[in-house]
Image (cartoon, coloured by chain):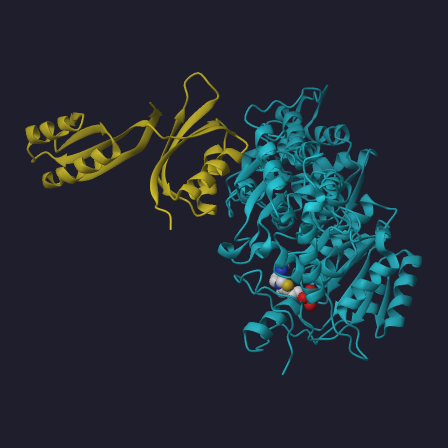
Chain colours: A cyan, B yellow
Amino acid sequence: MQMSGAQMVIEALKHEGVDTVFGYPGGAIMNVYDEIYKQDDFQHILTRHEQAAVHAAEGYAKVTGKVGVAMVTSGPGFTNAVTGIADAYMDSIPLVVISGQVPMSLIGTDAFQEIDSVGISRSCTKHNYLVTDAADLPRVLKEAFYLAATGRPGPVHVDIPKDVTAQIAEFDYSRPVEMETYKPTTKGNARQIKKAIDAIAAAKRPLLYLGGGIISANAAEEVRAFAKLTGIPAVETFMARGTMGADNPLVISMLGMHGSYAANMAMSETDLVIGLGARFDDRVTGKLSEFAKNADVIHVDIDPASISKLVNAEYPIVGDVKYVVEEMTALAQGKIDAERFAPWLETIEHFNKLHPLGYDEEPGVIKPQWVIERIGQLLGEKANISTDVGQHQMWTAQFYPFSRPRQFISSGGLGTMGFGFPAAMGVKRGDMERVSINVTGDGSILMNIQELMTSVEYKLPVINVILNNHFLGMVRQWQTLFYDKRYSETDLSMQPNWVGLVESFGGVGYNVETKEEFDAALKDAVEKNVVAMINVNVSRFENVLPMVPAGGSLFNMMLEYKDK
Amino acid sequence: MMENERRVVSVILQNEASALSRITDLFSARGYNIESLTVAPIPESKYSRLTIATSGSVRVIEQITKQLHKLIPVLRVYEHADLVEKEMAMVKFPITENLSDIETLSKAYNGKIVNVGNDMIIAMVADEPKRVSHYLEAVKRFNPKEIVRSGTVALER
Ligand SMILES: Cc1ncc(C[n+]2csc(CCOP(=O)(O)OP(=O)(O)O)c2C)c(N)n1
C-alpha cells in the first residue's frame, strides 16, 4: 500500500503491537505527530522533557519486558534524549527511539535544529539508522524492533529527515527480517555445558553469581529451579535483585561495592563462580586480581564480548541464559548431590551471623534504611520500586524484600540522577495494577521534577519517597571518607517547599518527621492514587555500609564508620 | 604483564553509509590502537573488506575481534595467524637525484619508478610492511619530498 513516511511510522508501531509512545514534538517530527493525532491504536504520552520520555520508555520496557518506544524532534529534542539512550544502552534495555531530522536537502548545512544525531548516538546504541528514503522505512523499523529485543537487548535509534516523513512510498510490513550479518547465538554449546556441569559436580564451594541478564532473558524461574535442584547458594548483582526472591533460603544477598559481608565473603571463598548473565562490572568485582582468586569461572552470557572481558572464564558459554540454565538443570539431575554443599552453606550462614546487613536506630531520627524496610513491610510484592541514584538507591537494593524479577527498576550502568521519577511513570503505565514507588533523594528528584505535570495529566500516579538528608548524600559520603570532610558543593540545606511544589501540579505532598507519620502518609498516598511526594527527613550523615572502597578487594570491607 | 603484539585483523562488513565510522568509533571509544586501516569494496558483493593492523595483548585482541563482530553490519572477523601481508608506498624525489640508483633500490623492494616529470621522480614499492619501512629508511639519502603509505592488506595463506 502507498503511504507517506509519517503514516508508515504509525503503521509499523501498530504492527509491533505498541500501546504507548512517550515523546515530545517539534518541527522536524511534526508530520509524524500529525498522524499520531489521527490514530487511536496507541496512546502518546507527552512528557515535559525528552530525557524523561526515554526514561519513561525504559521503565515501561523494564517492567513489561516489551520494547519501549520514545519519539523526539531533531536538534535539542534529540540531544535531550541522549542521556536516556545511553542509560538504556548501559543496562541493555530494549528501546526504539525515533527522532526527526532536518530535511535531506539541509543535512550538513548547520541548518536550524540540525545535529548529527546518528553520529552522537552511535556510541550509545546497539544500532542506529538515518533513513534517507521512505521506501526503506518498513524494513528499518522492523529491524529496529527486532534488534532492540533480540540477542543482548539495547536501544536502537532511527533518525528520519522531515522530507522522508512526507515522501510517499510502498508500505509492506510482511517481509521477515533478513539480516545476514546479525545472528545472535541462543543455544549454548552442548559440550561446554556438559563440562560446566562436571566442574560443578567436582566443586566444593560453588557460587551462583546472578546478573541482570537473567531478568532480561526472563530466566529467573529456571535459575531458581537450578539452584533448588543443586543446592548452590547465590549472590545477586544490583541489576539482578529479585531474581531469587527475598525469602529464598539460597540467596545470600547483593554483592559488590555495597554488597553484604556474607555475599562478598562467599565470592572471595568460592572455588567455582557460576556467572549467569552478569558482566563482572568493576562495582561488583572490586580489585580484579583479588576477585574470586581461587575459583574457576563458568560464564554464561548472550554477548560473547562480555565473556572473559575482565575475568578469564575457564568455561565460556555463549547463549541465552534461559536456554542454557534449562540444559544445565536437565544434566544436573541425579548428578549433583545438593547435600555435598551443606558445609559450604554453613560457612555462609556463619558469615551472615558475623556481620548481618543492618543499621543502628537512633532515637528521634528516622533512619533511611528503616524507610525502605517499612515500605517493604507495608507494600512488599504489591509495589514496583524504582529509584534515583545515590545512597537511597543502594539502601533500596540492600533492604527492600524484592520477591520477583522486574520489581526493581534502577539505573545501574550509567547511574543517572533524574531516572527514577519518569521511569516510575513508565512502570506505572506498564503495570497499572501495582503501586509505583520511586525512592529518591533530595538531589535527584529535582532533576526531572517537571514530570509532576505528566503524571497528573495522564493519571500515572507515582509515590515519590524522598529520603531527604539535605545532602547529595552519596558524594557527601565519599567526601567524609576520602576527602577529610570537605563537603564541596554537596550541602543541600536550601530546600523547596515540597508539599507546595507537588500541590501546585495537582498532586499530594507530605512532610514526615516520625515513623507514624510515614506510615500514615504512605497509606494515604496509596489510597488517593495521585502523584505524591513524601518528604522524609532522615538522619543527615548516614553512610551506606558495608563499603568496598573503589579498587579495593571484596573481602576488605568497611563494615562500620564511627564519626569521631 | 602480557606482551603487546602486532596483529592484523580483517573485517567483512556491509557497504552502508556509516559502517566505517562505526569501526573507527569503536577503536577510539575503547582506546584500542590502530596502526593502519585499509578498506575497499569486495567486487560483485554488497560487502567491503577492511584490514586493520593493530597491537595489544592477547586479551585486548580478543576483545577487539569480539567487539567488531558485535557491530550489526559486520559479517565476519578474521584474526590472521598465517598470512600474506603487503603494503604499498609511493615516494616523490627531486629530479636532481640519481634516477638509476632509485630504480635499483626500488626494484629490490618489489617496486619501480612510476612517473618522471619536469622536476620530480615518483617511485612505488609493494612489499611486507616491515620491508616497506626499510625501504623508506634506505631512500632517505635521496632527499624524498613526499611519502605516502597505503596501510596493510592481508590474506590468509
Ligand atoms: C546526572 C548525574 N549527575 C551527577 C551524578 C553524581 N552523583 C551520584 S550520587 C549523587 C548524589 C545524589 O544525591 P541525592 O539524590 O540527594 O541522593 P542521596 O545520595 O542523598 O540518597 C551524585 C551527585 C550522577 N550520578 N548523575
The residue at 71%/34% (across/down) is A334
Is residue A293 toward the left or the right of residue B115 in the image? right
Residue in the foreground of this view, choosing between B145 and B39: B39
Direction from residue B3 to residue B98 in the image, left or right: left
Q: Residue furthest top?
A: B44
Question: Would you place residue A396 above or below residue B13 in this image?
Answer: below
Q: Nearer the viewer, residue A99 or A479?
A: A479
Q: Nearer the viewer, residue A2 or B57?
A: B57
x and y, in percent, of residue A142 in the image: 67, 28
Could you tell me which residue is drawn at 52 percent across and 41 percent down? A314
Give the camera-side residue of A244 and B139: A244
Q: Position of residue A245 (x, y in %)?
A: 78, 50
User: Residue drawn at (17%, 35%), measured in percent from left and top?
Assistant: B135
Q: Is residue B151 above or below residue B28?
A: above
Would residue A74 appear left or right of A230 to someone viewing this image?
Answer: left
Q: Is residue A173 in view?
A: yes
- Residue A70 visible in this rendered orientation of the protein: no
Measuring from the top left, give residue B127's x and y in whole percent.
Answer: 23, 29
- Residue A408 position, x and y percent, is 75, 51
Left or right: residue A35 compared with residue A180: right
Write down which quadrant ligand 1 falls in. bottom right
How many numbered markers are drawn? 0
Quadrant for the C terminus of chain A in the image: bottom right
Quarter the N terminus of chain A occupies:
top right
